[in-house]
Amino acid sequence: MPGYAVIGGMWGDEGKGKVVDFLAQDFQYVVRYSGGNNAGHTVINDKGKFALHLVPAGIFWSSVTCVIGNGVVVDPSVLMEELTTLQEASVDTSRLVVSERAHLIMPYHVALDQLEERARGSGAIGTTGKGVGPAYVDKVARVGIRVGDLLEATDEETFLPRLEQVLKHKNAIITKVYGGEPFLVRDIYRKCLEWEECLRPYIQPTEVVLQDAIARGENVLIEGAQGALLDVDHGTYPYVTSSSPSIGGAYTGLGIPPQSIVGSLGVFKAYCTRVGGGPMVTELNDATGEKIRELAWEYGATTGRPRRVGWFDAVAARYSANLNGFTSAVLTRLDVLDGFPSVKVCVGYKADGKIFDRFPASISLMSRCEPVYEEFEGWDQPTASARQMAKLPENAVKYVRRLEELIGVSIDIISTGPRREETVVNRPFVRR
Ligand code: IMP
């Protein structure tokens, strides 16, 4: 059986971790293709509550092999810590494989991320400060150090001069441009040796692992990180992440052919959130926004930052659906809207005296846009924990049906709570 992708439909934090954990039982592989530990996937199951940043959410199923693909940037210290936490909760981590081609997030990337953000002042992107952007910069600049390079770290004569050369350049920027503290090559080299010892058993040519799995007819669940509107090409540039969270990134970030992905599932919250800077047309800077934030505990899983909150933006959602070719959608956190007298959906943008429904590339235009809303009567009865569509209040069903029309994709799964069983399945996502 082929590959199915689970993609964040908007700016991330849509609840992909729960969805992947729920779907993973039907898959032999669960794989990550982009981003790094800027992601934070919360999973609650019988083993406990986990905030996963690098390890795919399929790790809790003993039949699943988890893959960190070549498109991911890996901070080895974070990965080692995450593995230890999982092992302490008796989760078997031996089924994890990490691409030898994935690039490393080095300590100087983390420092540069934070120094660059500080220097941006009021124009800050609001990065997670985990070194993700600077690691991708080095990948594209062809000076990155890859996971597979660790396997040669003990060959001091080859590895050390390379590290020295990169570090000389990084230290010059850190000290001369930003007035920061330089890194010592010996310290970083020592860390590389530690990482090599710990991570060696996990390092493999993952594109071959996956191509072979697909050839054997095994099924692969592709776990997106962040969301399509943070895509470096298609998102709200420059307020984006430095990778390709949309479907295109899955092909290059895993090394699998296009025909192997036959389904893509767009995950949308019943309202919108965003972390960091950049325009958000439906943002609610009022008591309603505050109420949603507190009810839903909209605070970042990675940084703890309060998330910006707004009504569902169907202009953005449709743009994302077209970009990713979603074959199904999941709606999460519908229960958060329980009890609101009315709920709104943005169906158009208004700027410079015009109304339009095309998601703009220009950030200055987007910043001037006002939302054009459709308003729906709310519902008093709870949707929380519902397991069947028939159990949802009539007005909640009307809301879901209208979202389907506006996004142009059928909502096949509705998540009504954080646990696996709090899920309504209208149509199976995986076709047999
Ligand atoms: P970076 O990925 O840390 O460079 O951050 C770039 C932008 O993407 C910032 O606005 C972050 O808040 C946002 N971002 C990165 N990862 C996530 C995520 O997992 N969820 C939501 N926003 C994210």
Image (spheres, rainbow, N blue to C red):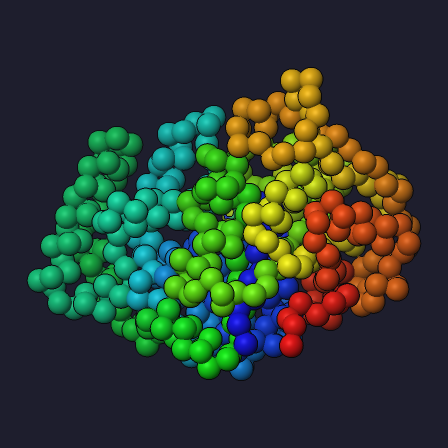
Q: Is residue 18 left or right of residue 209?
A: right
Where in the figure is residue 406, as x and y percent of width and height? 74, 45
Residue 235 to residue 257: above or below: above
Near-viewer residue (58 or 300): 58
Of residues 430 and 84, the one nearer the viewer is 430
Q: Name the quarter where the N terminus is drawn.
A: bottom right
Q: How many marks?
A: 0
Q: Residue furthest top?
A: 353
Q: Quadrant of residue 421?
A: bottom right
Extreme front residue here?
259
Q: Quadrant of the C terminus?
A: bottom right
Left or right position of 363 against 243? right
Left or right: residue 87 versus residue 9 is left
Residue 8 spot, x, y in % from top left: 58, 53
Residue at 53% over, 32% down: 361
- Does 426 sit above or below residue 356? below
Residue at point 13%, 67% (across, down):
155
Query: Within the image, what quadrant is residue 389 found in?
Result: bottom right
The answer to whether residue 110 is seen in the rendering is: no
Residue 305, position as x, y percentages in the image: 56, 43
Residue at (59, 72) in percent of width and height: 24
Task: Name the residue at 57% across, 56% down.
Answer: 7
Query: Is 273 placed above or below 179 here?
Result: below
- Residue 202 in view (yes/no): yes
Image-quadrant location for residue 352 = top right
**Residue nearer the viewer, 186 or 167:** 167
Query: Whole-percent x and y of residue 174?
Result: 26, 37
